[in-house]
Amino acid sequence: MSQPVKLALADGTVFSGTAFGAEGESFGEVVFNTSMTGYQEIITDPSYCGQIIVMTYPQIGNYGINPEDVESSGTALKGFICRELCEKPSNYRATHSLSSYLAEQGVIGMQGIDTRALVRRLRTQGAMTGVISTVDLDDESLVAKARNSPELVGQDYVQAVSAKETTCWSEALSDLARTPANRTLLEPCEKRPKVVAIDYGMKWNIPRHLVDCGCDVEVMPGTSTAAEILERNPDGIFLSNGPGDPRPLDYAVNTIRDLIGKKPIFGICLGHQLLGLAMGGEIFKLKFGHRGANQPVMNKKTGRVEVTSQNHGFALDEKTLPEDVEVTHLNLNDNTVSGIRHRTEPVFGVQYHPEASAGPHDSRYLFDEFMQSMTGAKV
Amino acid sequence: MPRRDDLHKILIIGSGPIVIGQACEFDYSGTQACKSLRELGYEVVLVNSNPATIMTDPDTADRTYIEPITWQYVEEIIKIERPDAILPTLGGQTGLNTAMDLYNRGILEKYNVELIGADAKVIAKAEEREQFKKAMVGIGLDVPRSEIVHTMDEALAVLDEIGLPLIIRASYTLGGSGGGIAYNRQEFEEKIRQGLKLSPVTEVQIDESALGWKEYEMEVMRDKNDNCVIICAIENFDPMGVHTGDSITVAPAQTLSDKEYQMMRDATIACMREIGVETGGSNVQFAIQPETGRMIIIEMNPRVSRSSALASKATGFPIAKIAAKLAVGFTLDEIPNDITRETLACFEPTIDYVVTKFPRWTFEKFPDADSVLTVQMKSVGETMAIGRTFKESFQKALRGLEIGHFGLGGGKKDLWESSLRPEEEEIRSKLSVPNSDRVFYIRYALLSGMSIDEVHRLTQIDFWFLRHLEEIVQLELELKKYSSVQSCPMDLLTKAKKAGFSDQQLAGWWNVSELQIRDYRKKQGLEPVFKQVDTCAAEFEAYTPYYYSTYEQEDESPARNPEKPQRIMILGGGPNRIGQGIEFDYCCCQAAFALKDLGIESIMVNSNPETVSTDYDTSDILFFEPLTLEDVLNICDRIKPDGVIVQFGGQTPLNLAKGLEAAGVPIIGTTPDSIDAAEDRERFQEILNSIGLKQPPNGIASDVEGAQSTAAQIGYPVLVRPSYVLGGRAMQICYQESELIRYMTEAVNASPDRPVLVDKFLQDAIEVDVDAISDGETTIVGGIMEHIEEAGIHSGDSACAIPPHSLPEKTIEEIRQATYALAEKLEVRGLMNIQYAVKEQDGKMDVYVLEVNPRASRTSPFVSKATGISLPRIAAKVMAGVSLKEQGVTTEVIPKHTSVKESVFPFSRFPGVDIVLGPEMLSTGEVMGISETFAEAFAKSQIAAGSTIPESGKIFISMASQFKDRIIEPARRLSKLGYELVATSGTASALQAADIPVHIVKKVQEGRPNLLDHMANDEIAFIFNTPSKRGPLTDEGRIRAASVAYGVPCVTTLPGCLAVIDALEAFASNPTPKVRALQDWMADMN
């Protein structure tokens, strides 16, 4: 009944657990997420492409999987690890168990290991490549595979998850997400602004928010050129989140560079990093990244702190940002750049996820700010 | 922009005595607040009537007032101290209510005192249900349908409109007292009547029933910049309908998707903002309908609460400490997170374990009480356990409860394997009506083959929880397939340990000793590791030495500290219960402070989330673990302590002493053998004989006949009790043989393999408690306490005074000498407590030794406050090897002023229960009154304990026949003071014969209007009633029970009545309260 599964890290550590979900073998960068809820949103977040996720919260799968809380049409991650899986979920919306969903999606799951020990190793040694396997259970062989697998740094994972063609987006926020605190505060505009959302692996809750603000949204591939985008005649351009290292994505950086000064631009996560690169900043890799729903971010303008959802392994280096870029938000845990804004153009980005999902709604106001940059709407 | 510089002096209001619904958690929060405000340079003034608190230690606050927490006394304190502000949000409901009284009476305005944390408007908006509901609807939140009523007529109209069942809550009462669920019209009327009476504003809320819905609590903090963070989400195992204090609760929330969780988070923060709590912590409760996800907001507490203490311990985030800093102007992003050091307090803790809290009830103390759990809290304590999975933490919590269950099944209390295996009908009824044993009946149900769906239908407990219980039961069945531990496959055994099964459970099933299981699994390398509680799920390095055990791979337990070569472990007292509560936690904390003074590394082990001892700041290393032999030995294996202190945590650690010693753990202080000598009947008798002390005549019996013959030999009345008991459990005075026979059947059941002790009961004797410290060379008496109530009333329930108020000096000296002799003979190293009885016989005072306990006593903190000498701290140093001489403690302190300790009872939680005191301890807490005279100190203690001292009005007197003569002169004094006396015919004729004016009222059986009617009409101000018959079915019993329901003070012993009369006289001649800081009393003594 209980099938063994192993995880080998490039540093030679091997964990043995019990398998769930799909069988097979895959490699990826092993990273941990500290959210206590929201595993479904995390699993379906395309930004995890190329990664194996360890959840720090030990009881996962409790409320199952439902059709509404997805952030993309499937999964992009390479493996999923938790301390104890719940086989029989309890929630009125659940239609699948986590295990059956992962099996359907072809994702290898692992439970029953000391996840805290694994997390502490990643924290001290840094995120590293690992191989998860139900087919090869030989430690030495697995460690060798982990060492020989390519690292995440320098890879382009965007093209694996980006939209392939331009589409219209119409879905709005689900009723559960439309709490009084999570709705637009702006007065409705006469004319619905049109936003082109460039999809580098976009979480669906972002366009849902844009629709909720009253935008018409068109989703375009991450490889789109500035000319192609401007041809759609948008009122604003949104740069989405996405997986991996932004540095190899020259096509995206070039596009954005050409767009700055032409239209209001708003970037989230990878989109924010690409924006920073396009404005002349540099990127560095964080030791083990920020992944969770409790990351405090200081809004330098208001002096207030937002509790944010984050998922990134790279960050903009504040020292390298040119004069005309202002740092608007800081991560209070390590003082890394969490938000930037062009001093003269309506161009800004945040490293974290105002669309939440999973995570708090504290930063929803950023969508209103984007809206205002396009329409001048009032609160 | 930190710290407000316009404030200099801040008054903190404590929560007073431990009562159901308000326990040590407010000592924890108040102590944290005092510490952090003083660190910031503020002068802190504290008022709290409870001496058994760390916060009332003279060095916790700058100025400490152990005075009644009423607006009158607090006004006097304000008058003297002139504080700039009051922080009312850390002293529970008492603190909040007192602050509101001060505000409503214009006292705050008069003395220009600001309320910080939450102002009067905020408190009213959160606490007044109508305002609250309106506010919540206003911000778009869903609420249960409900109405506020002030009269019975209004209530009946609501009943017709919404329909039954309905939930009834009285406004402004503690822990939901004066409430309940009404399933029928009669219940409804009863509960409304009681609620209107108990509510200080005659206001009752009637709610649409959300019975069976999922229940949640959110702990939230806000700073003056409007930064809001959620510290913890707590999910109740028991669905709506059971008070959260009586529910098993789990952190974090388990069955909410992120969408639902964020919806609740948004609602919590919106509520906080709308109510307007500017700074600090609050608690918001929600219910979710499981089938539809509809979420309603139930209530909000704009203050630190029991749940916030739990949340602090569950996450490592010190809510009260941070709340105090926020109240004086700091913002969350200006306060560092102590645990990680590199990050800030402005974040939301994330945890990588599961926390289970389990309530502890004491229904065995109140056999007549209704043990059904409702919206009115009935538990007296709680335990918390941390595990990596729910199964592990749940089973750890069960054994942490110390109720004889070492997990979900097994052990002597497991009925399944016994002749008492419950039948299906009983199982069904125990599942459908919430009660303290429900989880065990869920197991019986599963073992009997009942489906999970059926269990869910009956209990409405979420499937997620039930399936985990099912998995535990399946594991049990799997384990039982093997005949011995050796034949059980290691992976199954490992799985069992990971699921929280204890060695005790396994030992029971495999018919071997607990130690055999332990030895076997250790040989197999199956040992727990210790993980750190770090607020951040290992995302950052943590520095806080706070640990729990689990069966996993990596151990994080701390290495030896090179700067502190010695390690000493202190075993705490576990969950609060009647007989073992905050007093022992006080002692454990003092021990930790003593070790700190000596540069010794202190290691605390405890499982009670309410306490100061489980604050990670109190000791050098904290293990949050159940206090069982297995769990403590596991810690010892890793930590290798140089010494273990078992004297300070009450009976719990003492019960472990022998097992620890046998396992080679070094116990320091008085040896387990000496402890045994004091507890063993025969050995103790020998000791007394050898030093020329006497006991009341006594014997021992193991059956009914034996008891009868012993009693016949020593003569009635006799005091009977099982050996090795705590808090006078099952102790009783038998005046005649029939009572003895009835008792013996019960007692032998209560304690089958322990004999029953039969003592001659000394009638009308004065009881004396002595606390002393000895180092083997010197013995110092800490305090000699004369009880107010006569011997036979449990010492924990009796009021007492330091110094003795009536004993002759010669007797006191005799007691002192006896204490020295006993300390020497028992080779006491550390604290000891002796109970004496002094009986006047033929004009001579005879001193008897009733009991010796070579350990910290319940009175240790009271004595420490009365004399200014911290007994437990000194004793801990003695145990660590520093003699009394080396400490400079060589003389007994005899204060010039008088301190009176009074006990506080939970009767109002158990309607209908007879409140007569006896040898079984019933009180939950204590208060202290200090004054120059006994009468005034006693008066203060009465007010502090919640009695109203009437200035005029009717006093009802009813004396048992043997006391009638002795009440006459005291009654005359009452009459002279201007009180009208009321009595039933018997007592009345005795008073009339002595020319004392008295009104005669009808006894209950004499028709109406009788005394009960007069009580109901508020015509009786005080009751003196010494019992001739006991029990809720007697007339007297009904009167006494009614006194609780109607809130009329009732004294049930003659000495108690006499002391009250002294107090009334003192009060009449000097009605203005006089307050004085502890520091000033102390200064007088030097």
Image (tube, helix red, strand yellow):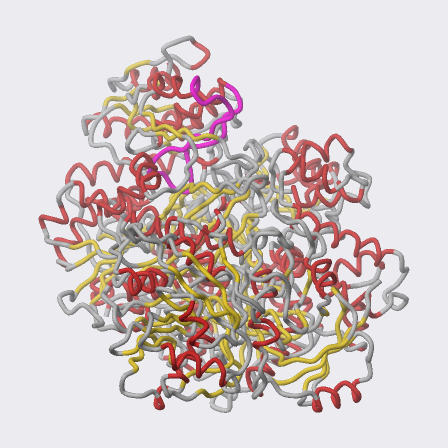
Q: Position of residue A273 (x, y in %)?
A: 43, 80
**Residue at left offset 71%, top offset 81%:** A131
Foreground pick, B456 / B14 = B456
Q: Is the residue B551 above or below the residue B945 in the image? A: below
Location of the N terminus of chain A by quadrant is bottom right
Report whether A195 appears left or right of A204: left
Count of picture labels: 0
Foreground pick, B35 / B743 = B35
**Residue at left offset 13%, top offset 58%:** B82
**Residue at left offset 74%, top offset 62%:** A103
Report whether B937 appears left or right of A249: left
Foreground pick, B108 / B588 = B108
Foreground pick, B367 / B689 = B367
Q: Is the residue B910 above or below the residue B599 in the image? A: above
Find out whether residue B464 is within the magenta segment: no
**Residue at left offset 73%, top offset 42%:** B452
Q: Is residue B942 visible?
A: yes
Q: Position of residue B510 (x, y in %)?
A: 85, 59
Report whether B1039 appears left or right of B420: left
Q: Position of residue B374 (x, y in %)?
A: 52, 36
Find out whether residue B182 is within the magenta segment: yes
Residue B691 found in image quarter: bottom right
Location of the C terminus of chain A by quadrant is bottom left
Q: Is residue B879 visible?
A: no
Single out the residue that lies furthest toward the top: B1007
Give, as a single range, the part of the protein colored magenta: B159-184
Residue B1026 found in image quarter: top left
